Image (spheres, rainbow, N blue to C red):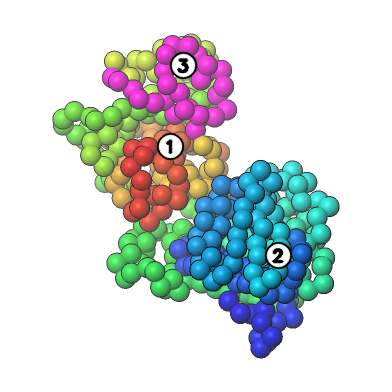
Amino acid sequence: MDWWCDASPWRDWDAVICEGAIRSGKTFCMGLSFFCWAMKRFQGEQFALCGKTMGALRRNLISRLRPVLKELGFSVREIKSQNTLKVRFGGRENTFYLFGGMGENSADTIQGATLAGALLDEVVLLPRSLVEQTVARCSVEGAKVWFSCNPGSPEHWFYREWVSRAEDRRALRVRFTMRDNPSLSPAVLERYERSFQGNFYRRYILGQWVGAQGLVYDFFDRGMVESVPAGEMEQWRISCDYGTVNPMSMGLWGRQGEVWYRVKEFYYDSRKEGRQKTDLEYAADLEALAAGRPIERVVVDPSAASFMTALRQRGWKVCPAENEVLSGIRVTADLLRQRKLVICEGCEDAIREFSLYHWDERAVGDRVVKKNDHAMDDIRYFAVSLGRTERFIGGFGVERTGW
């Protein structure tokens, strides 16, 4: 909180890196420290606030900080049309610009700016070009940079260029654990620790930079497969991973209570069958899979534009899937462990792929091998469609909307 203050041995350093476990309070602490520093040290200057998206930045940082800043006497006025915050405190006013980092071209939006400092939230998820451009724009005398992140692969460029070279970069490295967050009770801490295993446990609970290896869903085995439950389903949905040359995978999902069951599936491999199917044929296969059930929603591979058109023309309610692979895997793993998603007997292609779907150990960063992943993709699309990723991590605080 006060590493930049006059009495601190790090007051002349150029950056701080706040890393560690999820829900450890690092974003809140870093954000509060950043605003206090900016308003104490500068008048009439410009600063950058960078996040994966504008929505994530507002949700994870600004909405949590504004009430506290107001209580401390800060005046914070947001001008959404300009993506800026005007902050006043102690007779000073500074401008904070918001930047989202959804692609490499996001760096273009910050070019030309002259900054007195920057805060980059979840820096591991941001494009390298945006991070480097932001740091380069911090050219005002006394400028400093704040970074926060959950650990990723030790091959990630930010780990190699910043975390492992923190002292050379004159960057203070601060590690957080969940126990640094006083708002988490012992019961909540225990619940989080139960929600992750393997690679994700080491990263998100222990806060370690470790590489992905082995099976993606290493906890899944046939012992988790159940019979289709007796009784009526309360809702029905279908998920699809589209393929012409590659296999086409579709899953039929029914809900009873808090649990979604994959009760039946369709899987077509054109290479094995020796013939590719058309969109209209796949639409007929989906109709056969539904078998007259009242399907609320069909969640479809976002790249399958022509197939979605064919489904809409037949009257299906279609929802393009979100396709963030790593966050989707985390959501899927969490729901499977909690038994909120259950694979039923008869879904043999999904069960087969669970035993084959693995990380690419030769890749730089976290990547899965693009093989035996078609049922895995349609299951991931479905899991993420149930609600925003953040609402499922930890297995609680889930909003009912979307279920």
Does residue 298 belong to the magenta stretch?
A: yes
Q: Position of residue 186 (x, y in %)?
A: 32, 70
- Residue 283, image x, y percentages: 44, 15
Marks 1/3: CA–CA distance: 18 Å
Cα separation between marks 3 and 2: 54 Å
Give the percent coordinates (x, y) of residue 173.
Answer: 62, 74
In this figure, which residue is indicated by the disc labeled 1? 385
Disc 2 crowd, CA 10 A, few/some/many (<14, 14-19, 20+):
some
- In which quadrant is the C terminus drawn? top left
Of callouts 3 and 2, which one flags the residue occurring earlier in the amino acid sequence? 2
Q: Residue at x 71, y 59 (%)?
A: 95
Mark 1 secondary-structure assignment:
helix
The answer to whether residue 128 is visible is no
Residue drawn at point x = 60 percent, y = 63 percent: 75
Q: Residue at x 39, y 26 (%)?
A: 297
Between the C-alphas of marks 1 and 2, the distance is 42 Å
Residue behind mark 2: 93
Q: Of 392 and 334, which appears nearest the observer?
A: 392
Please state which amino acid type lies under the numbered disc 2.
Answer: Glu
Q: Please give the residue where the numbered disc 3 appears in the rendered image.
A: 311
Which quadrant: the N terminus? bottom right
Q: Is residue 319 left or right of residue 221?
A: right
Q: Cβ–Cβ below 8 Å for labels 1 and 2?
A: no
Asked if residue 23 can be seen in this view, the reply is yes
**Front: mark 1 or 2:** 2
Check the image and report above or below for 295 versus 149.
above
Q: Amino acid at mark 3?
A: Leu
| Above or below, 243 relative to 159 | above
Q: Which residues are magenta?
A: 293-321
Q: Is residue 124 a member of the stretch shown in magenta? A: no
Q: Residues within 10 Å of mark 3 (few under 14, many from 20)?
A: many
